[in-house]
Image: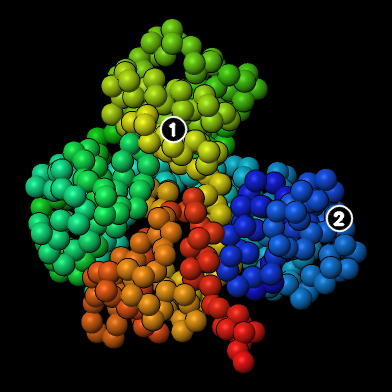
């Protein structure tokens, strides 16, 4: 694929890094020359110092030869215009990042009128994951993801207490022909390995054949437990806070939003129905006590500052709030997060990057995919002959710790893999990967046929 990315900000570069590990040639366009020079020294890709709103710039780079153009600037209107121009000039597909709620109310009209193929919204993406967790609890549909004869089930380990304290290698002694492929622990999804032990507050993701998983589901499914969500406090009235307040209010919850900016408070109060908007500092404990934070069923911290979100979430958790969710954009805080005991920590950058990479790939390699708690991705891929994981026993593969092979469809057979399993060409492979390391996933799925050709004698 030949892909152009407009904007050398965090999102644009995150997408570029992931796509470069796959079968893609990437060009980044930005008006900041210093930023591009820094980028070109870090990644093997073409950079163009230009204003992509200028048709002459798009023509001179040969935009008609590109498979995709992705606009990631901070301005919605700029993204819309550039994507539209590129499509009119012959780019095969265009993707625009659009965030403003006003635009979200007329997306189909924008797409049709401006001839834009896909629109992504980081704030809405993270909101959907938070909503699923709070209003439905299950991040998968009814707690199960199924593909062919294979299913993935999510449940709290307290619903199957025999698993508590069990080392991962002994899991199959309790649940034969099943495999733990993910654990949600202290707000963080991890890929389990041989040295890990299941703890008493873990949320497990277990894969196996559909019928046994359905039987297990009857024992562990907490039907209707979280439909009584009544009171939610959202700290931060930005775009994420707006979308979430709207969705939870329509769900039927009593929602309070705390926002410091006067103008933003006015906007929220005039655009949200049945939502209490409070002007104040979310870090003011007197205000939080006056607004009965301790009586909330859930608290979501979605200010514009990662440090504040983590601190506020920790405060809420220490005060006994059942569900606490934090929005955090910096991957450098990953190690800190696991020690805080927050129920869920989401990174809008990772979620959006994952969405865009799957749009670029289409169905060529990845048949289906679904996010898990907004942090991991369960996907089904077709094993190509020149992929690195084909023809090698899994125990001999140096798989990144962020990826696990969960199951294999081979014809009508289902294989729950062990270290001796060898994946063959055309197998349908179910894998779980962390979207924080999507570059490693793309590298694993890369078709190395061109590389083999270059070194053929």
Q: Is residue 363 visible?
A: no
Horizontal side of 67 relative to 203 (left or right) equals right
Alpha carbons under labels 1 and 2: distance apart: 39 Å
**Residue 153, placed above or below residue 203:** below
Quadrant in the picture for the C terminus: bottom right
| Label 1: few (<14), some (14–19) or many (≥20) C-alpha neighbours in 10 Å | few
Residue 267, numbered circle: none
Residue at 58% across / 59% down in the picture?
18
Instruction: Give residue 193's quadrant in the image.
Output: bottom left
Residue 50, numbered circle: 2
Residue for badge 1: 336
Horizontal side of 67 relative to 144 (left or right) equals right
Which sits in the foreground, 152 or 248? 152
| Label 2: few (<14), some (14–19) or many (≥20) C-alpha neighbours in 10 Å | some
Query: Residue 243, position in %: x, y?
Result: 50, 39
Quadrant in the picture for the N terminus: bottom right
Query: Residue 364, position in %: x, y?
Result: 51, 77
Horizontal side of 411 relative to 61 (left or right) equals left
User: Circle 2 — which element?
Assistant: loop
Give the residue at the far right of this rendering.
56
Horizontal side of 322 relative to 63 (left or right) equals left
Residue at 39% across / 69% down in the picture?
397
Q: Are marks 1 and 2 in contact (CB under 8 Å)?
A: no
Residue at 53% across / 38% down in the picture?
332
Give the mark nearest the N terminus, 1 or 2: 2
Query: Residue 115, position in %: x, y?
Result: 69, 65
Query: Residue 76, position in %: x, y?
Result: 70, 47
User: Circle 1 — which element?
Assistant: helix
Residue at 26% across / 54% down in the picture?
194
């Amino acid at each position: 694929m030949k892909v152009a990315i407009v904007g050398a900000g965090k999102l644009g570069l995150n997408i570029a890094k992931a796509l470069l590990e796959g079968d893609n040639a990437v060009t980044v366009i930005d008006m900041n020359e210093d930023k591009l020079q820094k980028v070109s020294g870090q990644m093997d890709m073409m950079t163009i110092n230009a204003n992509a709103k200028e048709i002459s710039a798009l023509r001179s780079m040969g935009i008609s030869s590109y498979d995709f153009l992705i606009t990631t600037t901070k301005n919605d209107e700029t993204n819309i215009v550039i994507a539209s121009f590129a499509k009119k000039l012959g780019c095969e597909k265009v993707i625009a990042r659009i965030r403003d709620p006003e635009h979200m109310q007329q997306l189909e009209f924008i797409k049709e009128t401006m001839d834009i193929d896909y629109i992504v919204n980081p704030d809405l993406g993270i909101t959907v994951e938070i909503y699923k967790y709070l209003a439905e609890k299950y991040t998968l549909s009814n707690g199960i993801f199924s593909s062919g004869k294979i299913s993935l089930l999510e449940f709290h380990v307290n619903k199957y207490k025999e698993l508590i304290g069990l080392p991962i290698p002994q899991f199959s002694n309790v649940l034969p022909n099943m495999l733990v492929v993910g654990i949600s622990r202290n707000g963080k999804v991890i890929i389990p390995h041989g040295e890990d032990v299941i703890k008493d507050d873990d949320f497990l993701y277990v894969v196996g054949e559909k019928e046994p998983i359905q039987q297990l589901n009857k024992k562990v499914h907490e039907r209707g437990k979280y439909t009584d969500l009544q009171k939610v406090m959202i700290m931060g009235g930005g775009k994420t806070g707006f979308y979430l307040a709207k969705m939870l209010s329509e769900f039927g919850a009593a929602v309070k939003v705390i926002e410091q900016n006067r103008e933003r408070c006015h906007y929220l109060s005039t655009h949200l129905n049945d939502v209490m908007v409070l002007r104040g500092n979310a870090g003011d404990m007197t205000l939080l006590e006056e607004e009965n934070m301790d009586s909330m069923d859930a608290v979501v911290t979605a200010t514009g500052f990662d440090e504040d979100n983590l601190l506020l979430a920790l405060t809420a958790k220490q005060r006994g709030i059942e569900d606490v969710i934090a929005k955090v954009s910096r991957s450098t805080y990953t190690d800190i997060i696991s020690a805080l005991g927050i129920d869920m920590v989401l990174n809008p950058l990772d979620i959006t990057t994952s969405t865009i990479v799957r749009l670029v790939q289409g169905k060529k390699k990845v048949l289906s995919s679904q996010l898990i708690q907004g942090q991991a991705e369960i996907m089904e891929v077709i094993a190509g002959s020149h992929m690195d994981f084909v023809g090698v026993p899994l125990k001999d593969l140096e798989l990144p710790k962020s990826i696990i092979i969960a199951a294999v469809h081979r014809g009508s057979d289902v294989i729950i893999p062990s270290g001796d399993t060898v994946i063959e060409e055309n197998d349908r492979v179910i894998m779980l990967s962390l979207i924080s390391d999507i570059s490693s996933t793309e590298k694993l799925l890369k078709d190395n046929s061109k590389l083999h050709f270059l070194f053929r004698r």
